[in-house]
Image (cartoon, rainbow, N blue to C red):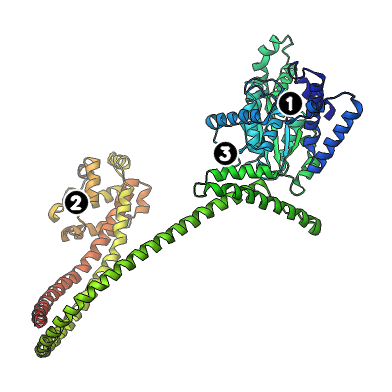
Amino acid sequence: MEFCSSFKGIIFANGETVPTANHLIRLYIHEATRVYSDKLISAEDKRTFQQLLRESLRKNIAEVDENIIFAEPMIYCHFAEGIGEPKYMPIKDWQQLTKLLNEALVNYNELVAAMNLVLFEDAMYQVCQINRILESSRGNALLVGVGGSGKQSLSSLASFISGLEVFQIQLRTGYSMYDLRTDLSDLYLKSGLKGIGITFVMSDSHIADEKFLVLINDMLAFGEISELFTDDEVDIIVNALRNEIRQTGMMDTKENCWKFFINRVRNRLKCILCFSPVGTTLRTRARQFPAIVNNTSINWFQTWPEDALRSVSTRFLEELEDLPNEYKLSVSLFMSYVHTSVNDISSLYLQNERRYNYTTPKTFLEQISLYSKLLVERIYDVKAMIERLKSGLKKLESCAVQVSELRVVLAVQEIELKKKNEIADKILAEVRAENIKAEAEKAIVSEEEAKVAEIKETVAEKQRRCDEDLAKAEPAVRQAEAALDTLNKSNLTELKSFATPPEQVALVVQAVLVLFSPRGQIPKDRSWKACKSMMGHIDNFLSQLRDYDKENIHPEVVKAIQPYINHKDFDPEVIYSKSQAAAGLCNWVRNIMVFHYINEAVKPLRAALAQANIELKAAMDHLNALRMRLAVSSCSLHMS
C-alpha cells in the first residue's frame, strides 16, 4: 500500500516537474520520504532511513547527480508556483516557501480567523506535508504529536491553501453519538451534493465518547456510515443526483446514484485526526479501529528543534517593548537552551526511572508568556520604586527648607506664648467659678432628661402594642386584596349576567351593597336589580372595591352586615361552585370585616398613644429650654 502511495505522489508531476532523470529520482526520494519517513517516531530512525535510502540509490543507480537529487530543501507541493495555481513543483529555496506561506497566513487571518503562527522550517515542512495529503485522492491524515505542537493550526492553514473549509466538532454538555451523526450527515450533504471541499479536523479533546471512533472508522474504511441517513433522505439524495449521473453516461439507478454520492464524499471530505502519543490511548485505538492507521497517511510531529525554538521565542520577544533590543537575542537563546536541556534531562529520567516527563511546544509558549508577564510586572514595580524614591528625596529637601523657616517663626511665637500664658492663668480662675455654676444647672438638666426618658419608654410601649394589634389585621388586608385579584372583568360580567342568581350568590352581592351604603344609610331595596345597578360598569366597580375606606365603616353598616357574616352559607368555598366572582366577593367582605373589628380594638390604644405623644412633646420642650439655658452658660464660660 505504501509502495502505491509513493507512485501516487509521482503521478502528481508533469514535464516541468521532472525535466531530467535526476529530477525524477529526486521526486521519488521525496515521495518515499513522505510515505515512509514521516511515519517514524524518532529522529534517529529518520536518519537511519535517509542513510539506507542513499545506500540503496548508490547501489542500484549507477549515474546520479547527488547535488541535484539531495539538494535542500527537499519539498514538493501543489502551491510552489503560487496559491491557487495547483502544480506539483519543487520549492527552490526557503525564502520562496516562507514568502508563499506568509502570504497564505495573512489571507487566512483576513478571511477566516486570526491565527498567531510562527512559520519556522519544521512548521513549513508540516504545512507542505499536510497539503500533499489533502491534495491526493481520498487523502486522510493521522497527525501524531504532543499537545501544543501545532497540529490543528497547521491543518487549518494547509486546508485554506487547498481551498477547503475546516469543520471541527463544537462539544457541549450532552454531546452524543446522535449529535455526531447529525454533524457528519451535514458534512456528507455539503460535500456529496454541493461538491464543497471540507476538512474534518478531530482531536483527542473532541472524542467525548470512544464510540465516536466507530463512525470515524467506517467513514475512513468504506466512506459509508450505517444508518447515517433515513430511507427518505436517501431517496432525496438519489433524486438530486440523477441528472448528473445521466450526464456521465451511466444509468440513473438508485445504486449508481448512491455509489456516485459516496465516491464524491470520499474525494471531497478529508479527515485529519490530531492525536497525542502520550500514554496507551493511541495504541488501543489503533487496535480497536484499524482504519485510523490503515486508511490515513501518518505524519509524526517531532520535538521542535532548537532553531525552531529560537525563531518562535524571537518572534514573541520582538513584540515585548519593555525588553531592550540588545537583550532579546540572548534571552531567546537562553529560553531555547532551557527547553532543550529539560528535554535532555527527561530522557535521562526515562532511562533511570522508566517514567515519562513530556515537555511540549505548549510548555515553551507558556514559558515565553510567563517571562513576558513577569518582566512587565517587575519593570512596573521597579519604576514605581524609583518614582517613590525620587518623590521621597524631593519631600526631604522641601522639609529641610521648611524646618529652617519654622525655627525662626518658633522663636517669635515663644515670646508671644509666654504673655498669653499669663493672661490664661487669670482667665482660668474665672472659668473655675463659672464651672461650679454650670454643674448645678447640669444636674437639673440630667433630672429632666431622666423624666423625658421615662415618658419615651411609655410612648414606645404603647406604640409597640398598637403595631402588634395592627399587624394582626395585616393578614386580613392581604387576603382581601388576594380575593380582589381573583376578580376580573370576565367573571364579574358572568356574575352580572345572572337573571335570577342562586340564593348564596344573591346573599354575597347584597352584603357588598350594604358595605357600600353611603353615610350608614342602609338601602331598603336589596333586590337583584339593585345589586346589578350597584355593579354598574365593571371597571368602576373593581376600582370601588380596591379603594374601599375600610378604616371608617359606619356603625349602622357594621350592624346591618352582621346577619350576612353569620349566615351558614356565607362561605367562599360553598359559593365557589355557584360563581367564582361571588366567592371572591365573599372572601373580600369577610376579611374587610375582620380588619374592621381589629381596627376598632386598636382605636383606644391610638388615642392613648396620641395623648402620650402630647405629654412627651411638652416634656421635650421643657428639656430643650433647659438645655438652651445651659448652652448659653457654657458659651459664656468658653468665651471667658
Residue 185 visible in the current orientation: no
Residue 11 or residue 180, whichever sits in front = 11
The image shows residue 66, relative to residue 15, as above or below, that is below
Residue 116 - label? 3
Report which residue position mark 2 lands on: 516
Amino acid carrying label 2: it is Phe
Q: Residue at x 73, y 14 (%)?
A: 253
Residue 67 percent location from the top left of the image:
79, 28
Label 3–label 2 contact, CB within 8 A: no
Quadrant containing the N terminus is top right
Residue at disc 3, secondary structure: loop
Residue 430 percent location from the top left of the image:
9, 89
Q: Does residue 536 appear left or right of residue 634 in this picture?
A: right
In the picture, residue 587 is in which quadrant?
Answer: bottom left
Amino acid carrying label 1: it is Arg
In front: mark 1 or mark 2? 1
Report which residue position mark 1 lands on: 138
The image shows residue 504, relative to residue 46, as above or below, that is below
Residue at disc 1, secondary structure: loop
Q: Does residue 577 appear left or right of residue 73 in this picture?
A: left
Amino acid carrying label 3: it is Asn
In the picture, residue 633 is in which quadrant?
Answer: bottom left
The image shows residue 322, relative to residue 189, as above or below, that is below
Residue 607 or residue 412, whichever sits in front = 412
Q: CA distance from mark 3 to mark 2?
A: 80 Å
Q: Earlier in the sequence, mark 1 or mark 2?
A: 1
- Mark 3, Cα crowd under 10 Å, few <14 / some 14-19 / many 20+, is few
